[in-house]
Image (cartoon, grey):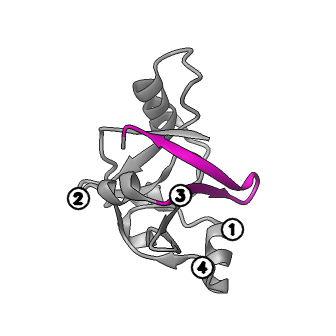
Amino acid sequence: MVLALDPVPIDETDPAVYHKTTNRYGYDERLVRVRGVGDKTVDDVVMVNARGVVTETTIANIAVLIGGRWVTPPRTDGLLAGTLRNRLVALGDLTERSITVADLGNAEAVAVVNSVRGWRPAVVVDP
């Protein structure tokens, strides 16, 4: 998976970011903004909140390997805590911690996590 950062922050005070919905408008808009129409070199977009903290992608939770430990943002940073992410946190395979854009750029590895697609390695272009 190739990921790129969306320069427009999400509003973590909006209750909609914490719930799964069929309203994809805001997410699809982010994809078009970052990759342009028809560009397939970027698979998904990494979103950040107003504090510049990484939240998730438009279709998955994000995990980052820092200091030999996989971490994922806490729900309070403004994200939908997916079922696979929650299971990995409960098992101790993921630890919750806020992730900065700098952390993303310095990460040993990045992955996206989604209950339908599973755990997939990812790279972030220009973090």
Lower position in the chain sequence, tag 1 or tag 4: 1
Answer left or right for 81 relative to 99. right
Quickly name the residue at label 4: 89
In the rendered image, residue 73, in percent from the top left (x then y), is placed at 44, 68
Answer left or right for 34 relative to 117. left
Q: Give the extent of the magenta segment.
A: 108-126
Lower position in the chain sequence, tag 1 or tag 3: 1
Lower position in the chain sequence, tag 3 or tag 4: 4
Question: How many C-alpha atoms fall within 10 Å of the one at disc 3: few (<14), some, or many (≥20)?
Answer: some
The residue located at (76%, 54%) in the rendering is 116
Is 112 in front, or is 123? 123
What's under tag 2, amino acid-wise?
Arg
| Nearest to viewer (mark 3 / mark 4) | 3
Residue 84 is labelled as: 1
Mark-to-mark CA distance, 1 and 4: 9 Å
Quickly name the residue at label 2: 51
What's under tag 3, amino acid-wise?
Ala
Q: Which element type, helix, strand or loop, lies under badge 4? A: helix
Question: Above or below — where is 67 with respect to 123?
Answer: below
Q: Which element type, helix, strand or loop, lies under badge 3? A: strand
Q: In which quarter of the image is the N terminus?
A: top right
Question: How many C-alpha atoms fall within 10 Å of the one at disc 2: few (<14), some, or many (≥20)?
Answer: few
Is 9 in front, or is 16? 9
Q: Which element type, helix, strand or loop, lies under badge 2? A: loop
